[in-house]
Image: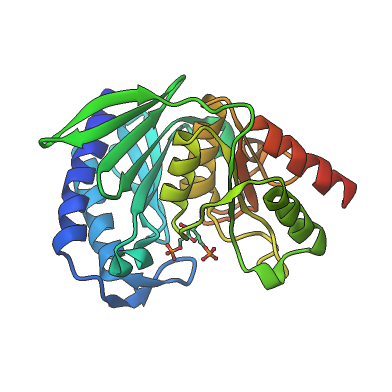
Amino acid sequence: MTEIFDAIKQTAIEIKELIVNGDTGKSEQENATGDTQLKLDIQSDLIIEKIFANVPSIKAIVSEEQEAIVNLHEKGKYLIAYDPLDGSSLVDVNLSVGSIFGIYENDFTADNLIASVYVVFGPRVELVIATEEVKMYRLLKGKFEFIQTIALNEKGKLNAPGSTQNCWAPFHKQLIDDIFNDGYRLRYSGGMVPDLHQILLKGGGLFSYPGTSDRPKGKLRQLFEVFPFAFVFEKAGGQAIDGKQRVLNIPTTHIHDTTPCFFGSNEEINRVLKVYKENE
Ligand code: AFP
């Protein structure tokens, strides 16, 4: 997979340039989930597809920004699902955004996920690769240098509660309030990548994007957002659930399926499991 990791590093360098100098305006198009695409979404997707097209080991790709699977190399071994620029609507207010990649074998399903990578475009560009370990690299003088291995504590201090609060189930609202009453700090930017990166680097806590009355199946996409980060959190010693089970046990019926999701340290996730079980 080294050639894939190297290709992703190249996409990050080119997308960084696009973020700094590109047009943050809206396009006339919508993606498969019905989101209006920004020009940055489309341009970053084109960068990734261009670079992946030159990697023989990539059999096929699927992007949040495209409806269908794109076949690349018939003899390729790997399938990659990616979100080219998650949180792109935050660029025009100068907040951090990111790219997310899930590397699968045989099929786009959670049980076939064998590695994941994400890139954070913030004050610095950082890239995290999860295989059996979680390793962070930083872009320094045009090259990605290894910085550290990432591991979560059993219990953290940060709480990142997502989704529309007036659509939360009452028991979910009580759970979030109780966590804050226990002294956790609110850390939520609306960008999944920097929000999860912060929890991973600051030792832990909880990120939640639950099912709600307006979005019972949540908002975050299984293949290119939830599963890759679930892989990262589990390899870093934490957990990722949908409220009842590991998200990496969830079957995928459509490549743009979403799922409720909770990512965190063991103590926080076990607290979510207990509350959700009591309110089944
Ligand atoms: P955009 O890509 O449309 O900016 O959405 C970002 C995102 O998919 C994810 O990065 C955030 O965690 C989540 O949406 C934030 O959603 P809410 O604004 O509903 O909390």
In the depicted view, which residue is nearer to us: 187 or 55?
187
* 270 and 31: which is toward the camera: 270
Residue at x 54%, y 46% (from the top left corner)? 226
Asked which quadrant contains residue 163, the reply is bottom right
x then y, percent, for residue 108? 50, 41
221 displayed left or right of 115: right
**Residue shown at the point (57%, 29%) measured from the top left:** 234
Measuring from the top left, give residue 141's x and y in whole percent: 10, 35
Residue 168: image quadrant is bottom right
Q: Residue furthest top?
A: 132
- Count of labels in the image: 0
Residue 115 location, quadrant:
top left
Q: How are the residues colored?
A: rainbow
| Image quadrant where one finds the N terminus | top left
Determine if residue 53 is in view.
no
* Name of the residue lying farthest toward the left: 141
Residue 10 in view (yes/no): yes
Residue occupying image coordinates x 47% and y 60%: 190
Q: Position of residue 32 (x, y in %)?
A: 46, 66
Is residue 217 left or right of 52 when viewed as pictured? right
- Extreme bottom residue here? 28
- Residue 229 versus residue 136 in the image, above or below: below
